[in-house]
Amino acid sequence: MVVPFAGTAGVGARDAATWFDEQPSDLDTAGVAQRSRILAADGSLIATFYSENRVDVPFARIAPVMRQAVVAIEDSRFYEHGALDSKGTVRALVTNVGSGEVQQGGSGITQQYVKNLLISQADTPAGKAEAQALTPARKLRELKYAVAMEKRYSKDEILRRYLNIAYYGAGAYGVEAAAQRYFGIPAARLDLNQAALLAGVIRYPYAYDPIEHPDVARQRRDTVLARMAQLRLISPETAAETAAGPLELHPKTFRSGCVTSKAPFFCDYVQREILTNPVFGSTAAKREKLLKTGGLTIRTTLDTQTQRAAQKAVDRHVPRRNSARKAAAEALVEPGTGRIKGMAVDRALGPNKERGKTWINFAADADHGASIGMQSGSTFKVFTLAAALEQDMPFGTRITAPGSYTPTGFRDCKGRRVGDPDASLGNSADGEGGRSFTLVTGTHHSVNTFFLELEHEVGLCDTVKMAERLGMRQANGKPLEQYPSFTLGFNSVSPLRLAAAYAAFGARGRYCRPVAITSITGPDGKGRKVPSARCKQVLDKGVADAVNHVLQGVLTKGTAAGMGIGRPAAGKTGTVDNFSAAWFAGYTPDLASAVWVGDPRGGYRYPMTDLCMDGECYGEVFGATIPAPIWQDTMEGALRGRPAGDFHRPPGFYFSLGSGEEAPKRPKRKTPAKKPGDGKKKRGDPPAAADPKPRKRAA
């Protein structure tokens, strides 16, 4: 074969023989695409990603009958000849080159493995075309590589590699994926019927696809059985008996991506973590290739019990295709570790134009979900409270909350004056102004003007720095904006960051960046570097204990009274200006959560007032109206059957002015005028001490 292309018959043949015997410098057997898997903390499958659906398996995990069937039909003398089966190759080369198309397949298994390897490693359409071109040069290159393969690997290893790289039709690459695709079993459990069918498919996978062409596939299977009988690998009787039976397909579909995942938005978060983090590759293209071809096993922090509870809760209170087109999102983080335990959105992952679907992960920041965040409302008051407690203000510290507040005398962290002397910020509930509150009662009743006065006393910059120490930034990645109404929550943030901040209180001041991935291993079992939570003590334990003490009362005496979960818990409601959104952030020592409810079309344009949603009607939606019940249902389900942790008693000096529990008398609420929907079923009307809505910030 070499002589006609070698120049002269003597020297040329000698040089060609030397060329064949040399190990090719560009021989690389790595880089075969394998599918990656994302797993929950318990090892259950969340999703798969692939460009080619392939799982590489060792020789021992391929049924012996499968190996026999492939050798019988593809290269019966495989274990006897070297890299070149001269009879078959010469016949195929002459026939195919003469006709200009593939009419015979005389290549042995080693050559077929080389061809598949070169095709798989080609990164461009042109490269793949070159790897399949009907030219003598391509054939000679394959033969040279085949010689090298025979020197480098045993026959069993070459056969294993071939079985793992071959295409079996229906999107299945490799014998393991093919066994799962057609029969729903691993390759180790293939029987004679199944093995003969798969072995026959390899030659022309599109023509012999048993799902699309069952009759042709069955004929091909019978051909393999007959060949196995001819080679005395099975008896004629066994071949005939098997051929008389049906194909017995049990197709199983493997979809690439997060759309069909049971935790689609957590899955999408993990995917974006890999696609955007330079630790997984210097370019976006390299990171995507790693995910789709690297055969990674990605173990995550997701707790399936927590995820089920969260998804059930958001879907129950804000149905996916609700008539008001509102949305809900929740993120759950483990205090002290930063591990994301659950992430739920009341939508399916998909095109936004389809009702009940979205590509935007409302629970995450823009870099992990395309969301620009939502104004946080009164959930930000906790940072002012923490700053005050850090300055050793006792629980009984009293501050008068005026009926309205003009923000003057504020400076940001650069020392610049901020505020608007013509602006007036106030409270939403009647009669809240003009009286004094303690740190405890002011927090329980979430009094806007009280917190504006408190922020002025502790310093706007100290409040901002407290939030930043606890990981807060805008969802678009920018630093928090600094204005007097900072404490009222005008900054747009994500539920995930808010949950992580509140988790730090549950962990007694230890803040951890949210993390979703615990480990990543490649096909070779070697681990890869993953993002760290970078846990750090950012708050004195006593200060965190004091915050926890105050926020526990929100669930018993404050704006979220009645939202307890039967174990020690703390939290804070949040209602955004004009009822454009509502929040609840709450936690135990073991789990923290933040819930947002609003309108993706724009909260100010579509506020949650006189809201009717699938037969449920509400007057004005506060943090305790819908978000808190979602939190309550989630936490009860997530923590069911798990031991309850407890908070620590704060240092004694915080009680130096008393407990701060004195509740001021509140006037009776006015009877509201009858509104549309009053005749329908209502729930979630705000309690007497309703969470006040923040006003717009003063620029």
Image: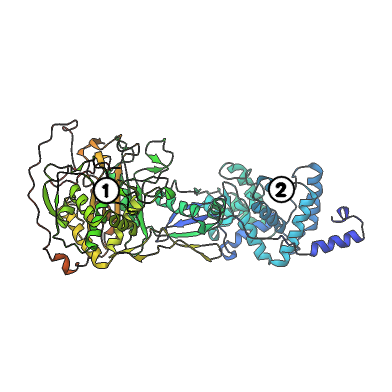
Furthest-bottom residue in this view: 652
Mark 1 and mark 2 lie on one chain; the one further toward the N terminus is: 2
Side of 207 where 137 appears, left or right: right
Q: Which structural element holds mark 1?
A: helix
User: Is residue 481 something one can see in this rendering?
Assistant: yes
When asked about the image quadrant of residue 532, the answer is bottom left
SS for callout 2 = loop
Report the disc number at residue 484.
1
* 10 Å crowding of disc 1: few (<14), some (14-19), many (20+): many
Image quadrant holding the C terminus, namely top left
Residue 156 position by quadrant: bottom right
The crowd level at tag 2 (other Cα within 10 Å; few <14, some 14-19, many 20+) is some
- Report if residue 615 is visible in the image: no
Q: Which of marks 1 and 2 is in front?
A: 1
Residue 111 x/y as whole percent: 72, 56
Q: Could you tell me the amino acid type at mark 1?
A: Pro
The x and y percentages for residue 56 are 57, 59
Q: Nearer the viewer, residue 6 or 368?
A: 368
- Asked if the residues shown at circle 1 and circle 2 are in contact, with their CB atoms under 8 angstroms apart, the answer is no
Q: Which amino acid, mark 2?
A: Gln
Q: Give coordinates of residue 113: x percent, y percent.
A: 68, 57
294 or 467, which lies in front? Answer: 467
Q: In this view, does 282 lie above or below 679?
A: below
Residue 585: give its label.
Answer: none
Q: Position of residue 508 (x, y in %)?
A: 27, 65
* Cα–Cα gap, marks 1 and 2: 68 Å
Quadrant (top left, top right, bottom left, bottom right) of the N terminus: bottom right
Coloring basis for residues? rainbow
**Picture mark count:** 2
Q: Mark 2 points at which residue?
A: 132
- Residue at position x 11%, y 63% in the image: 657
